[in-house]
Amino acid sequence: MIDVYYWPTPNGWKVTIMLEECGMDYTIVPVDIGGGDQFKPEFLRLSPNNRMPAIVDHKPFGGGDPIKMFESGAILEYLAEKSGQFLPNKPADKYKVLQWLHWQMGNLGPMMGNANHFKNYAKDIADDPKQLVYGTKRFVGEVDRLCGVMDAHLSANQYFAGANYSIADMIIWSWACLLERLIDENAWTTYPQLKRWVDEVGERPAVQRGRAAGKELAEQERTEEQEKARRDLLFNQTNDKVRAAREAAAKHTN
Ligand SMILES: N[C@@H](CCC(=O)N[C@@H](CS)C(=O)NCC(=O)O)C(=O)O
């Protein structure tokens, strides 16, 4: 059994989609990131970067003690090796998958996250409109460039690593499917090949189940004041603010 420390967001969906694709048993352990669960000592010992998702595999691949892991890219690679699915063995094919997986982790995820922040959240809290304009232009521009990279690649390839669906598709889809909603309402007219691929992957039953996993967790009604407190917690993190939680987690281990 695998415990998935999770909240229903794009980085969380990557893991539930892969588990659904492989038919592996899992239990969701909610990490309410707007409520501060990511700073609890027991979670920080699993995920020192105070971000979800993280997993604990009680029957790990290779045997031995339970494996604990954070970072969605590493988790998908581990699950692919454990299940023997969605990551080919032959090095030439395997690294075709891994290069796109790492491309998502270092490019699309962070850039879409920041573009979404400046477009949809910072506008409520920015006290300097110039910063807001600059931040939006910088990150929305990068997302546009990255979408062009994906669209061009998908015009010659059915999936990211060629003819076969892989963990690279799962990891990229979890963010790309939100393009229109988070960043640009006209996105699909500009990137038709990306749209073709987003629709095709989105029709997979396992992808639909993975994306729906735990969705009720985020559907709770909240007052405007509660929403503001959640945004303040998420968007104002500094070393000083998280140090105490980290030290409490470390104390527990010793
Ligand atoms: N690179 C990490 C990113 C994880 C991440 O940013 N998770 C967000 C939710 S999508 C989170 O836990 N945020 C909590 C916080 O900002 O404190 C991964 O892919 O696992």
Image: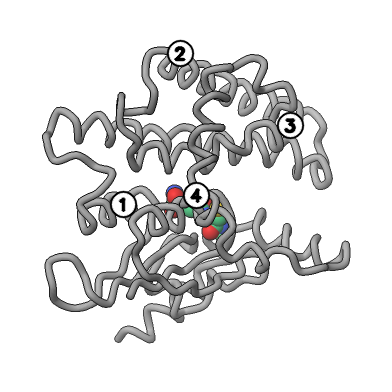
Comparing labels 1 and 3, the label whose residue is closer to the camera: 1
From this view, report whether residue 43 is shown above or below residue 168. below
- Residue position for label 1: 74
Image quarter hosting the C terminus: bottom left
Q: Amino acid at mark 4?
A: Pro
Is label 4 in a helix, a strand or a loop?
A: helix
Is label 3 in a helix, a strand or a loop?
A: helix
- The one nearer the camera, 162 or 8, is 162
Distance, label 1 to label 4, CA atoms, is 24 Å
Q: Amino acid at mark 1?
A: Ala
Is label 1 in a helix, a strand or a loop?
A: helix
Compare marks 1 and 4 and give the one earlier in the sequence.
1
Compare marks 2 and 1 and give the one earlier in the sequence.
1
Comparing labels 1 and 4, the label whose residue is closer to the camera: 4
Residue drawn 32% across and 64% down?
A: 69
Distance, label 2 to label 4, CA atoms, is 27 Å
Distance, label 1 to label 3, CA atoms, is 34 Å
Q: Which mark is residue 152?
A: 2
Q: Pointer 4: residues within 10 angstroms few (<14), some, or many (20+)? A: few
Tell whether 57 sits left or right of 229.
Answer: left
Task: Find residue 140 and report its image quarter.
Answer: top right
- Residue position for label 4: 205
Image quarter hosting the N terminus: bottom left
- Residue position for label 3: 131
From this view, report whether residue 86 is shown above or below residue 210. above
Residue drawn 46% across and 18% down?
A: 149
Q: Amino acid at mark 2?
A: Ala
Compare marks 3 and 2 and give the one earlier in the sequence.
3
